[in-house]
Amino acid sequence: MLHQFWAAAPKSYKTLVFAAMGLIAVGLILNIAGHVAANQGLMVASLPVIGLGLVLHMVGLVVRGQRVRKNIPK
């Protein structure tokens, strides 16, 4: 199911997934860099980036759920 869904998934869903993963990764890198450099401003600034990535991830889950629910035969 997972492989078939990814192969047939719309580009908007794939874009959401990769944008979410990218934002979470950038936020984590910023947070780690801020911690290593003892820069509290950078650590705090990374939190909204991580949060936005998580929100996009949840939106992707909703999009996927709606798509799967739409394709279930009744």
Image (cartoon, rainbow, N blue to C red):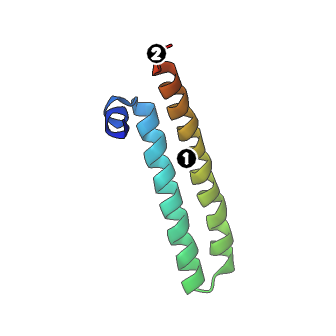
Residue 15 is labelled as none
In the image, residue 42 above or below residue 55: below
Judge the density around disc 2: few (<14), some (14-19), many (≥20) Cα neighbours within 10 Å: few
Query: The N terminus is located in which quarter?
Result: top left
Residue at image x 53%, y 68%?
A: 28
The mark total stands at 2
Mark closer to the chain start, 1 or 2: 1
At horizontal 47% and vertical 54% (from top left) the residue drawn is: 21
Q: Comparing marks 1 and 2, which lies closer to the viewer?
A: 2
Image quadrant assignment for residue 14: top left
How far across and down, in percent of the image, does residue 68 sit? 48, 27
* Residue under the image location 40 percent in, 29 percent down: 10
Quick one: SS at disc 1? helix
Mark 1 to mark 2 CA distance (whole Å): 26 Å
Amino acid type of the residue that numbered disc 2 sits on in the rendered structure = Pro
At a point 58% along the width and 73% down the height, the residue shown is 31
Image side of residue 7 versus residue 64, left or right: left
The residue singled out by tag 1 in the image is: 57
Kindly state the secondary structure of the residue where label 2 is placed: loop
* Type of amino acid at the residue the image marks with label 1: His
